[in-house]
Amino acid sequence: MTAFEDLKSQWENQGKSEIPKDGAKQILKKITSVRKKQGITNAVLTVTGLVLVAFFFYVSAYKFQPVMIGLLLMIGALVLRIGLEFSSIRTLKNLNVSTTAEKFKKQMIRYYTKRRKVHFILTPIIILVYCIGFLMLLPAFKESLSSGFYNYIVVSSVVVLVVLCFFIAREIRRELAILSELKG
């Protein structure tokens, strides 16, 4: 019985956790920050998609099947990613912040669990589809561009892909840390 007595004593002597006075404001600030970042991501993706659509018509891609398919894969991947981000923003907007802290925490855990699935299942597929589309364009680029500019496109695309993967990995780690903190 002494183990129980020790445990009971430790329980009674532990400090009371204080709820921050501005806890709700901090939560709303974090949600607003997440929404803002997702909005910026969507803006960048949308501009990239619009550039690809303009490029599609500029080079008359509909006349060349491999170019058309490559650009459509790239545009489709971006549209899918934009749709996923808008869905996440809508989910965040619909969170009930006026509920109890425990229910709100459960909502946030569900949100970040869904985001984890997006990051580990859909994001790699989207990046792969985008890269396949880009690779389909390379023969047309090689044929119609100077070798120097073609090499620049190949090298810069690899650099952009590495940098993009770095930022995506950093964002995934940040969201996983939030999920871990919520579950912990």
Image (spheres, rainbow, N blue to C red):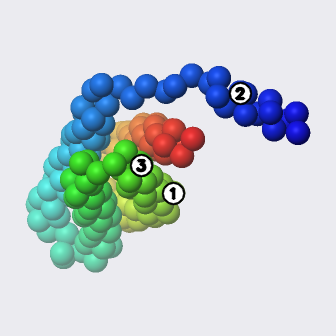
Q: Position of residue 55 (x, y in %)?
A: 16, 58
- Rendered image: mark on residue 179: none
Type of amino acid under label 2: Gln
Alpha carbon separation for disc pair 1 and 2: 41 Å
Instruction: Give the residue number, with chain letter if any, for mark 3.
Output: 102
Between disc 1 and disc 2, the foreground one is 2
Q: First in sequence, mark 1 or 3: give its number.
A: 3
Q: Residue at x 43, y 54 (%)?
A: 106
Instruction: Give the residue number, with chain letter if any, for mark 1.
Output: 120
- Provide the secondary structure element on which disc 3 rests: helix
Instruction: Give the residue number, with chain letter if any, for mark 2.
Output: 10
- Pointer 3: residues within 10 angstroms few (<14), some, or many (20+)? few
9 on left or right of 46: right
Between disc 2 and disc 3, the foreground one is 2
Q: Residue at x 26, y 48 (%)?
A: 97
- Viewer-closest of 99 and 121: 99
- Viewer-closest of 92 and 106: 106
- Provide the secondary structure element on which disc 2 rests: helix
Q: First in sequence, mark 2 or 3: give its number.
A: 2
**In the rendered view of the protein, which quadrant contains the N terminus?**
top right
